[in-house]
Amino acid sequence: MKHWIPFLLLAIGCYVWQTQAEFFTSIGQMTDLIYVEKDLVKSLKEYIKAEESKLTEVKSWAEKLDQLTRTSTSDPEGYLGHPVNAYKLMKRLNTDWPKLESLVLQQTSDAFIANLSIQRENFPTDEDESGAAKALLRLQDTYRLDSESISKGRLPGAQHIVFLTVEDSFELGKIAYNDGDYYHTVLWMQQTLKQLEEGEPSAVTQAEALDYLSYSVYQMGDIHRAVDLTKRLIAADPTHSRAQSNLDYFKNLMYEEGKSDQRMDEEFYQSQSKEEVYMRPDNYLSERDSYEALCRGEGVKMTTRRQRRLFCRYQNNNNHPRLIIAPIKEEDEWDSPHIVRFHEMLSETEIGKIKEIAKPLLARATVRDPKTGVLTVANYRVSKSAWLDDDEHPIVKRINQRIGDITGLEMETAELLQVANYGVGGQYEPHFDFSRRPFDSNLATLGNRLATFLNYKDEPDAFKELGTGNRLATFLNYMSDVPAGGATVFPDFGAAIYPKKGTAVFWYNLFRSGEGDYRTRHAACPVLVGSKWVSNKWIHERGQEFKRPCGLTEVD
């Protein structure tokens, strides 16, 4: 290995052996579960043949899953690109298959149990199922999807239509409840009740859904509706152990607000079928609304005047020998800061080989803790990544060389090629690629929104051990098309760049002075439908002294 191999690769190494967990963070690795499930169905059908007279219920289960796996194996990535399919796969393998195992154990079949026990070593965990569920909730928020649309599988660009059962909707609500997320608990318990009222058969009862819903609306501050729902709960299940005491407690709170019992009864009859929509709670992300709006294609600040400053060209980097005959197609995506897209950057063969090499190396992507400088996983970055050296394959070396040819920058001090695959609802919330230093107030001239970044904490010198300086520039390759979602957005200046297979985008993170360009704070929007593959090259300062000389001012 070269001396400049990022030390963070060592930290990531410890995660490579944990790829059995956190399947939801990578669609690419989840495709293996499709074949695991297919094998389980085959084993199950063999068991049924021997025990058919005693296992009518199990046979019905197998036939249902046999049809499902035929569909999923015909196009694993496309199938798992639908987030509901991905969630249900997690749920089936983590919850439903173990239930089936208990049923079969009542009348033991050695062959089937042995196979299932072996396969369970590769099963997703509770964390996977919960992660897939939370991904659905994240997609619901970011793209403003109503619960019914998700339950009916009505997602833009989806190839596979799949429905959520009453049990599925109920489980989503329970996962949100157990996470203290009462906002989503309300949404999904309301959806559960709606499906039950429409006559969908289910083992889940109306009382169970009302129990969660009544307490959750109380937690959302709606005591009046909590009373109404608790009355419905008592009507549905008069023997419920907590309902009456909850009702008394809620009534006492209302009496303190001066409500009469008669008025409460009137409100109850007026709102029995009413579905309330509550304000989504704020979170730690100050620019959440603008970030999510850009992900939906809203708030993009591309004006006619700005468009006139954007051009396409053939670029040969000042007659570089390898680009004279085959110049790269370059398109301006944004004027300031300057962001360009290179077309036909990667071929289908190169993309296929990079995926093939990276897939077995994928580990949960990490971020650097701004306080400690230590690499750790985070809920705001949901993907898996691998780091490829030139020695991995000649194609890796060729791609790195091509990046150097196009940008005119030194690659010897750049980080390894990072390959990432985004999982269910995969995202990377707004972040900087460069390491922040103490902020210079003189840089506030860059824009009226830059002041918001004054609240961001400085980091330890994240790249000190590399000895290569800060991350000067980012070169991002798109290795798949994404039917819906997955854009790269820049909240500060309102840009949204959409993945296009084989293309790459490039921007500088630092000014010529070495100061960070805080406008380049960007995000990878959640993947709504599809599987997103990218690879990126972070180019560092050292070695660029004559390739990108310093400017005369801090912000050149």
Image (tube, grey):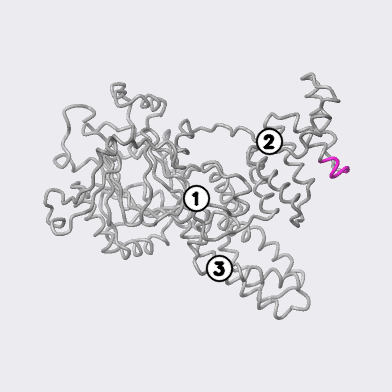
The Cα atoms of the two marked residues, 2 and 1, are separated by 26 Å
Give the number of the disc on residue 276: 2
Assign a secondary structure to mark 1.
Answer: strand
Residue at left offset 67%, top offset 62%: 98
Residue at left offset 77%, top offset 20%: 257
The spot of residue 281 in percent (x, y) is 58, 32
Amino acid type indicated by mark 3:
Thr
Residue 413 on the magenta segment: no
Mark nearest the camera among 2 and 1 is 2
Amino acid type indicated by mark 2:
Glu
Amino acid type indicated by mark 1:
Leu
Work out whether 395 lies above or below 220: below
Determine which quarter of the picture holds residue 337: top left
Span highlighted in magenta in the image: 233-239
Give the number of the disc on residue 528: 1
Determine which quarter of the picture holds residue 328: bottom left
The answer to which of marks 3 and 1 sits earlier in the sequence is 3
The answer to which of marks 2 and 3 sits earlier in the sequence is 3
The one nearer the camera, 266 or 223, is 266
Asked if the residue under mark 1 is in contact with the one under mark 3, i.e. CB atoms within 8 Å, the reply is no
Work out whether 100 lies above or below 273: below
- Residue 174 in sight here: yes
Residue at left offset 27%, top offset 58%: 390
Mark nearest the camera among 2 and 3 is 2
Please state if 231 lies on the left or on the right of 166 as rendered.
right
The one nearer the camera, 29 or 211, is 211
The one nearer the camera, 185 or 1, is 185
Assign a secondary structure to mark 2.
Answer: loop
Work out whether 164 lies above or below 299: below
Please state if 316 lies on the left or on the right of 136 as rendered.
left
The spot of residue 41 in percent (x, y) is 62, 71
Q: Which residue is mark 3?
A: 71
